[in-house]
Structure formats: C-alpha cells, structure tokens
Image (tube, grey):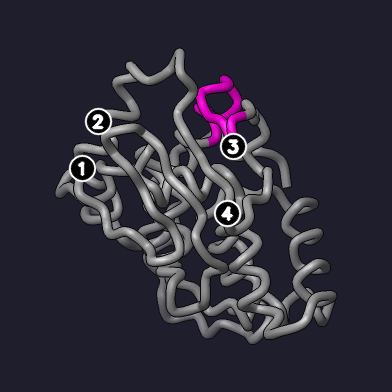
Amino acid sequence: MSRYTGPNCRLCRREGAKLFLKGERCTLEKCSFERRSYGPGQHGQNMRRKKSEYSVQLRAKQKLARIYGVREGQFRKYYKESTRVQGVSGENLLRLLESRLDSVIYRLGLAPSRKAARQLVRHNHFTVNGKRVNIPSYLTAPGDAIAVAEGSKRLEAVHESLRRSREMVSWLSVDKANLTGAVVDIPSRADIPTPVEEQLVIEFYSRV
C-alpha cells in the first residue's frame, strides 16, 4: 500500500468512523465526517449490503493502518512480530504501533496529529535520550526520554498543540514547560484508546 495523498476526511468516511487524522479540526463542527458520515463515492450511501467476514476483517485492518499511518509492508511486519512474542497477538500489535516515535509524540501532545508528528520527526525536531532521531517508526521503550530539540523549542506547531487539552495516557509523562516527555511503562490494552477490534486484524492476516 503506497502512501495515501488524498483527502484525509475521505478515509474517515470510508471506515465509517473518525480517525482523527487532522487533529483539532476533527473535533469541530466543520469536520466533513459530521456533515457526510456515509461512505465516499456514488454508492457510499448504500448501507444495506451485507458484509462478509472477510470484509469486516479487512476494514478493521485498513482502519488500524490508517489511524497510525502505516504502509502495508510495514504493517505486515508488525503483525509477524506481534505473533512471535509472548502474549495476546492483538494487544502486542497495538503496543508496537503505540510505541512508534510519531505516535508517542502525538500522545504526549507535542503534535496535533500523527501525520504532523511524522513530519516533525523527519525534520529533526525531536531527540530520544539526547540524540536526534528522524525515523518516525523508531520504537521507543520504557525509560526513553523524548524532547523537542534545542533549536526547535520555538516551533509554533508544538506550542499550539500543547495549548489544546488532550487526554494523557498513563504510560507516558509530559513536562509541558520544558517540552519533554518520557515513556514510563509498557502500555496495556486498557491504556490504548484506539477504537478498533484488533483481533479482527490478527484473523485477517491469519487467513491470508
């Protein structure tokens, strides 16, 4: 799956749920999903068609991949890794996705969306344990310290994002004054507010 470059709101309408791909705009009344919550295209309003088991699993996979902005090849690697380690595969998959640097920065409130976080990371605006990291898929671990790079502390995008209220997850801590954050624990499923049935994703790849 190549990188999607079309309208983000079209993805939300396709999945039938808000994916919060545009940050604050998704919470406003002018959000396109609020006005047109049906699927895109000329057949988008046809909701009577019965969905097959495969279709339900595919949509769950697509929804999860789009929320985190992960391409198909990388997403499949996360699936394989989640089945190799001990524990529930679906929860392992979510932990891997949440541990990505772009996702952690978004959860800390240092970026308005994961897409914005990826762009900021690629432009060397963040450090992990004192070293600049420009790889959005970099996997963080408990004990890692994330900070806005010294030369980037005046970025308006970061300060504007921090000014907006956002629910913090318990496995992260943030110091808004110093523009820093830390991974304090491994997230449990209850600590990951991602609206998706991850077991359907595991079932999808298991049958392929």
Residue to which mark 4 is pinned: 143
Number of marks in the rendered image: 4
Secondary structure state at the residue bearing disc 3: strand
Question: Quick check: marks 3 and 4 in contact, CB under 8 Å?
Answer: no
Secondary structure state at the residue bearing disc 4: loop
- The residue at 43%/81% (across/down) is 48
Marks 1/3: CA–CA distance:
24 Å
Q: Earlier in the sequence, mark 3 or mark 2?
A: 3
Q: From the viewer's perspective, is residue 74 above or below residue 184?
A: above
Residues shaded magenta: 118-130
Residue 155 rendering spot, x and y as whole percentages: 35, 19
Marks 4/1: CA–CA distance:
26 Å
Question: Quick check: marks 2 and 1 in contact, CB under 8 Å?
Answer: yes
Marks 2/1: CA–CA distance:
7 Å
Secondary structure state at the residue bearing disc 1: loop
Q: From the viewer's perspective, is residue 201 above or below residue 139?
A: below
Q: Earlier in the sequence, mark 3 or mark 4?
A: 3
Q: Amino acid at mark 3?
A: Val
Tag in front: 3 or 4: 4
Question: Quick check: marks 3 and 2 in contact, CB under 8 Å?
Answer: no
Question: Which quadrant would residue 57 be assigned to in this image?
Answer: bottom right
Q: Earlier in the sequence, mark 1 or mark 3?
A: 3
- The residue at 55%/53% (across/down) is 68
Q: Earlier in the sequence, mark 4 or mark 2?
A: 4
Residue 160: numbered disc: 2
